[in-house]
Image (cartoon, grey):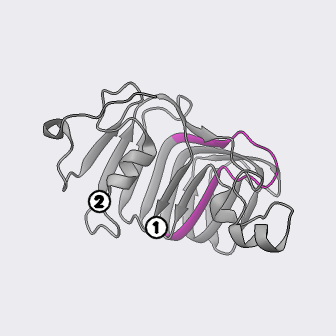
Amino acid sequence: WPFTTKPQSKAPRPNAKSLTVNSDGSGDFNTVQGALDFVPDHSKQRITIKVQNGVYQEIVYARNKDNVTLIGESRDKTIVRYANNEVFNPHPANIRTNPEPGTFPSRRAAVAIDNCNDFNVVNMTLQTTAFGQAEGLLITGDRNILAHVTVIGSGDAVQANGLIYMVDSTIDGAGDTILGRGTLFCERCTL
């Protein structure tokens, strides 16, 4: 499985405020996960990650990423998806005590934004293609915004923890649709 990396001279500056993701290699990163890994934990400055149209087949997990705007080129053509659920990623503690798959939520979402504050997701589709306990999005933190987003999941399509504002968006779920221990305020949304 051969691969190459960009020369260091073409890498984004460590303090870059704007990053681009394009699966064809023309951006700063080929994956959304790669761009989020580049963002420092608890950033004091806003960092914008522009995701070009395409289907990004990847599990995305962002933890401790504050002041991030993740913006897609087109809501219907910028799609981040993966077949993830509690069967594929059970919690290790549950495996030891229970031979059945676990349901630890931070491991089963296609996209998890965990312990992130002031995180904005704009203009894209987030989707799990698996069934069962399989969120399209798990989001935990305060002052997070979802705008012009479609979330598709199974079990609980969205798990919302913390303070979240959702506007002009759609949640499409098979099961509970929304689960959480926080406040999710929806304006002009379709559930």
Q: Residue at x 30, y 67 (%)?
A: 43
Give whichever of 73, 82 is nearer the camera.
Answer: 82
Please tell me whether mark 1 sits on a helix, a strand or a loop.
loop
Relative to 165, is 88 above or below? above
Q: Residue at x 44, y 61 (%)?
A: 119
**Range drawn in magenta:** 124-142
The x, y position of residue 153, in whole percent, is 72, 47
Q: Which residue is mark 1?
A: 116
The x, y position of residue 123, in whole percent, is 49, 41
Disc 1 crowd, CA 10 A, few/some/many (<14, 14-19, 20+) = many
User: Mark 1 against mark 2, which lies toward the viewer?
Assistant: 1
Residue 29 relative to residue 7: left or right: right
Q: Residue at x 73, y 60 (%)?
A: 90
Alpha carbon separation for disc pair 1 and 2: 13 Å
Relative to 71, is 39 above or below? below
The type of residue carrying mark 1 is: Cys
Q: Earlier in the sequence, mark 1 or mark 2?
A: 2
The type of residue carrying mark 2 is: Arg
Give whichever of 160, 108 is nearer the camera.
Answer: 108
Q: Which mark is residue 30?
A: none
The x, y position of residue 66, in whole percent, is 38, 66
Q: Locate residue 20: give its quadrant.
A: top left
Residue 81 relative to residue 9: left or right: right
Q: Locate residue 10: give its quadrant.
A: top left
As for residue 139 lying within the magenta part, the answer is: yes
Residue 168 relative to residue 5: left or right: right
Q: Which residue is mark 2?
A: 46
Outermost residue toward the top? 24
